[in-house]
Image (cartoon, rainbow, N blue to C red):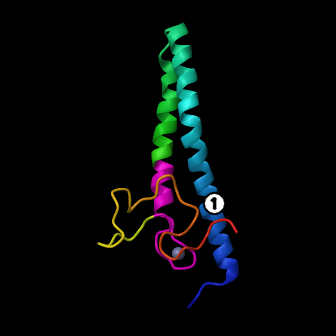
Amino acid sequence: MTPSIHEISRGLADIRKMRRIFLFILFSFLPILALIMAYIERSKNWLPILLPSFLFILGMFIQNRLHKMKCPKCNAFFFVQTVSKDNYTPSSSISFPPQKKCQNCGLTLYH
Ligand SMILES: [Zn+2]
């Protein structure tokens, strides 16, 4: 049974949302870390280090969730390549940063 267009677009919307959250954390992590380190340098108060630590853990958690997301069309993992002898590269099996299309059937996130 093939999923309907509606089911596919709903599935894609979920993946897009999770990918956006992940990319936001990814790109905000370093600037936030730099700001916090500058603050710690001045104030000698180490407590704010908890914020980037928390972001880092949250990022790992989101990435984990993201990599478990299934493609709404082919039902394989969206971001995880099925590694075979032919397509193996050192960075295969996970896509980092997360790609815009299904690693199995090529369904794209954005049309
Ligand atoms: Zn797919």
Label 1: state its secondary structure: helix
Q: Count of labels shown?
A: 1
From the image, give the main secondary structure of the stretch colored magenta.
loop
Query: Which residue is painted at 59% across and 36% down in the image?
Result: 28
Q: Is mark 1 within 8 Å of ligand 1?
A: no
Res 14 → quadrant: bottom right
Q: Residue furthest left?
A: 85
The magenta segment: 61-79
Q: Is residue 90 magenta?
A: no
Neighbour tally class for label 1: few under 14, some 14-19, many 20 plus, Cα within 10 Å: some
Q: Is residue 78 magenta?
A: yes
Disc 1: which residue: 16
The relative height of residue 28 versus residue 22 in the rendered view (above or below) is above
Q: Type of residue at label 1?
A: Arg
Residue located at (49% from left, 24% from top): 49
Q: Which of the pair 67/30 is nearer the observer?
A: 30
Q: Is residue 65 left or right of residue 24?
A: left
**Left or right: 1 in relation to 110:** left
Residue shown at 56% from the left, 91% from the top? 1
Q: Quadrant of the C terminus?
A: bottom right
x, y (%) of residue 100?
Answer: 58, 62
Percent across and percent down for residue 12 are 63, 68
Residue at horizontal 45 percent and vertical 54 percent from the top? 64
- Residue 68 in picture, x, y percent from top left: 46, 63
Residue 58, how many percent across, how many down? 50, 43
Q: Nearer the viewer, residue 58 or 86?
A: 86
